[in-house]
Image (cartoon, rainbow, N blue to C red):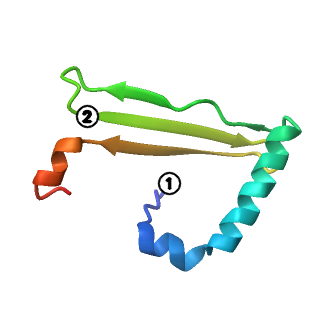
């Protein structure tokens, strides 16, 4: 399996704001028909609270696909080369 990681510019090249709004409308329809699962995100903090990882899973029952958005937040990185 190959994991695809895309950046901000690549997303904009593939998906316009109009297309995104249309896609979100379809997702809300799926949710209203109980044909999708979108639980609250789960956060896991580092013990010293210097950063966290947020995991946001979702399932589309109509197309039988699922995905996961994972983010990391380290507020101190804005002063480092990692920002």
Image quadrant occupied by the C terminus: bottom left
Residue 11 relative to residue 39: left or right: left
**Label ID, residue 1:** 1
Q: For the point 20% across and 31% down, which residue is it? A: 50
Q: How far from the left and from the top, in percent, is residue 9? A: 43, 74
Residue 42 relative to residue 74: left or right: right
Residue 83 relative to residue 17: left or right: left
Q: For the point 73% across and 61% down, which residue is it? A: 23
Mark 2 lies on a secondary structure that is: loop
Q: For the point 42% across and 28% down, which residue is it? A: 43
Instruction: Decide: is 10 above or below 43.
Output: below
Q: How far from the left and from the top, in percent, is residue 15? A: 61, 73
Q: How far from the left and from the top, in percent, is residue 46? A: 25, 26
Q: Disc 1 and disc 2: Cα gap in Å? A: 29 Å
Residue lying furthest bottom: 13
Residue lying furthest top: 47
Residue 8 relative to residue 31: left or right: left
Circle 1 crowding by C-alpha within 10 Å: few under 14, some 14–19, many from 20: few
Considering depth in this image, is 6 or 41 the residue closer to the camera? 41
Mark 1 lies on a secondary structure that is: loop
Residue lying furthest right: 33
Considering depth in this image, is 76 or 58 the residue closer to the camera? 76
Q: How far from the left and from the top, in percent, is residue 28? A: 78, 47
Residue designated by label 2: 51
Q: For the point 47% across and 74% down, which residue is it? A: 10
Residue 58: image quadrant is top right
Q: Earlier in the sequence, mark 1 or mark 2?
A: 1
Considering depth in this image, is 55 or 50 the residue closer to the camera? 50
């Amino acid at each position: 399996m190959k994991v695809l990681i895309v950046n901000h510019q690549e997303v904009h090249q593939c998906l316009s704001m109009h297309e995104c709004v249309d896609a979100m409308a379809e997702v809300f329809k799926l949710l209203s028909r109980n044909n999708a699962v979108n639980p609250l995100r789960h956060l896991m903090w580092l013990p010293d609270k210097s950063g966290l990882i947020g995991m946001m899973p979702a399932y589309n029952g109509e197309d039988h696909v699922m995905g996961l958005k994972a983010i990391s937040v380290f507020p101190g990185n804005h002063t480092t080369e990692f920002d």
